[in-house]
Image (tube, rainbow, N blue to C red):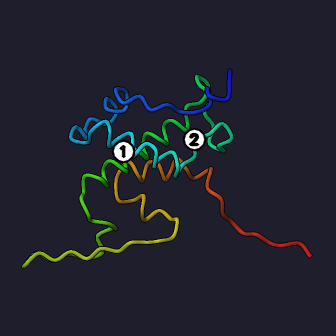
Amino acid sequence: MSAADHIVELDLTEWREIYPQYPKVSDVQLQGLWDVACALIGNTPSSRIPYDPPRTERRKIILYATLCHLAYLATRGDVVGNVSNAAQGSVNVGLTFMQKQNSRWWEQSQCGATAWMLLAPHRSGGLYVSGR
């Protein structure tokens, strides 16, 4: 198995079967969003998210869910952030956007929330105590 075998390739037909709710997003748009998903998640042989088919497809599942999240955001237009408040008379919507890398950005869609949960074992964090 070569190093290239450890890179997830986007199969648009397969992705569209898994996520049929985005028929209006073109293949060209999806390919561009795939590049963004790969930049966000990491899709190289040295990625810390395993991809070694057929034993583990974890990175592929996360990348496909991330692509779904990005496709969802692309279909929302220029709206960025989570709804923080809403009113009905004269229609008012307040949005908040969190700039930190946290779950709020991912929670804007079901696919994003799924990707966020799948990424849990691979996120850096925790308490760092320097040695003296």
First in sequence, mark 1 or 2: give its number: 2
Marks 1 and 2 sit apart, C-alpha to C-alpha, by 16 Å
Residue at x-position 47% and y-position 71%: 99
Local secondary structure at mark 2:
loop
From the viewer's perspective, tell me whether residue 8 is left or right of residue 64: right
**Front residue of this view, candidates 121 and 45:** 45
Q: Which residue is mark 2?
A: 43
Question: To which quarter of the image does residue 19 belong?
Answer: top left
Instruction: Give x and y (percent) for residue 58.
Output: 55, 37
User: Looking at the rendering, in which quadrant would you find the N terminus?
Assistant: top right
> How far across and how far down the image is residue 37, in percent?
47, 47
Amino acid type assigned to the residue bearing label 1 in the image: Cys
Rendered position, 117 above or below 43: below
Label at residue 68:
1
Which picture quadrant has residue 29? Answer: top left
Q: For numbered disc 1, what is the local secondary structure?
A: helix
Residue that lies at the very extreme toward the left in this rendered image? 89
Residue 56: % across, % down: 59, 30
Mark 2 closeness class: few <14, some 14–19, many ≥20 residues within 10 Å: many
Residue type, label 2: Asn
Residue at screen point 52% across, 65% down: 101
Q: Residue at x 43, y 39 (%)?
A: 64
